[in-house]
């Protein structure tokens, strides 16, 4: 009678231990697989990308958009791959340096140093040229005259805090803070033109030419010899 009780007690104890082990295994499986299942069920409807330079480059943005409407786990994996392999490498190579503004639509076309349109935005504080019609698309390169004009604006901005120029009738017009209108050609040597403007300002300010800065309303650099009006 005693032996039977001992055997039965051991059998019950063994069954209890197996139950505990199975419970622990089930709990662990639940902890491991439930988050994975939830991630598979969650769908990503929209992906947005930005950086310290404003929006992400166009090619990166395009790649990320292809992952929309997929599950969270897959999106996380693919987005990470794109950012590591492409974005971090190209961030310093493809950041906007200039802007072309369409005066009709008020859209700003962000341009990198390779003359490529990276993005179209509603505002920008970069060196800007304004045109009545901008006929370029994302990923395309701007023409040589526009690049020349942007370089002029950039260099003049360093000297006279002017960040915007207007292209009209095959010339670039900049209005300086003194109220003086400066007219540039759309081709030539950027450094020579900006250097010439700086020399004119220097001579006007010291009065060596018999006229002073406040007497001038316009400086025309489109000719071999600058014209002051």
Image (cartoon, rainbow, N blue to C red):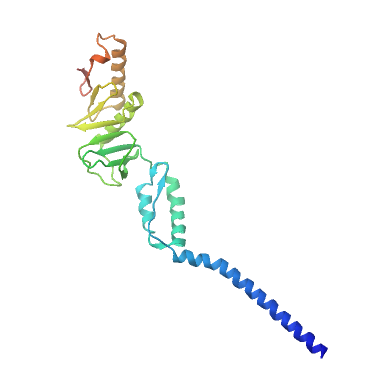
Residue 35 or residue 102, whichever sits in front: 35
Residue 181 or residue 78, whichever sits in front: 181
113 lies left or right of 20 = left
Point out residue 100 in the picture as x, y percentages from the top left corner: 27, 38
- Count of numbered circles in the view: 0
Q: Quadrant of residue 46?
A: bottom left
Q: Quadrant of residue 70?
A: bottom left
113 lies left or right of 102 = right
169 lies left or right of 36 = left
Which residue ends up furthest to the left in the rendered image? 169
Residue found at x 46% / y 58%: 76
Which residue ends up furthest to the right in the rendered image? 2
The quarter of the picture where the C terminus appears is: top left
Point out residue 127 in the picture as x, y percentages from the top left corner: 32, 33
The quarter of the picture where the N terminus appears is: bottom right
40 lies left or right of 133 = right
Residue found at x 28% / y 45%: 140
Residue 128 or residue 3, whichever sits in front: 3
Point out residue 206 in the picture as x, y percentages from the top left corner: 31, 11
Residue found at x 66% / y 74%: 21
Q: Is residue 154 above or below residue 49?
A: above
Point out residue 116 in the picture as x, y percentages from the top left corner: 31, 42
Which residue ends up furthest to the bottom in the rendered image? 1
């Amino acid at each position: 009678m005693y032996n039977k009780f001992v055997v039965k007690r051991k059998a019950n104890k063994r069954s209890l231990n197996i139950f505990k082990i199975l419970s622990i295994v089930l709990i662990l499986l639940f902890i491991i697989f439930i988050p994975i299942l939830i991630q598979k069920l969650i769908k990503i409807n929209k992906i947005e990308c930005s950086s310290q330079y404003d929006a992400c480059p166009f090619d990166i943005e395009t790649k990320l958009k292809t992952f929309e409407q997929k599950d969270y786990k897959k999106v996380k994996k693919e987005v990470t791959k794109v950012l590591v392999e492409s974005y971090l490498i190209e961030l310093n190579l493809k950041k906007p340096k200039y802007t072309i503004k369409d005066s009709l639509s008020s859209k700003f076309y962000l341009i990198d140093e390779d003359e490529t349109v990276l993005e179209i935005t509603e505002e920008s504080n970069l060196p800007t040229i304004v045109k009545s019609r901008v006929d370029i698309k994302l990923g395309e390169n701007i023409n040589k005259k526009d690049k020349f004009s942007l370089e002029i604006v950039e260099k003049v901005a360093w000297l006279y805090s002017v960040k915007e120029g207007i292209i009209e009738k095959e010339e670039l017009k900049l209005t300086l803070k003194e109220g003086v209108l400066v007219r540039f050609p759309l081709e030539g040597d950027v450094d020579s033109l900006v250097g010439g403007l700086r020399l004119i300002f220097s001579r006007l300010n010291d009065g060596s030419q018999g006229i002073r800065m406040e007497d001038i309303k316009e400086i025309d650099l489109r000719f071999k010899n600058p014209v002051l009006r």
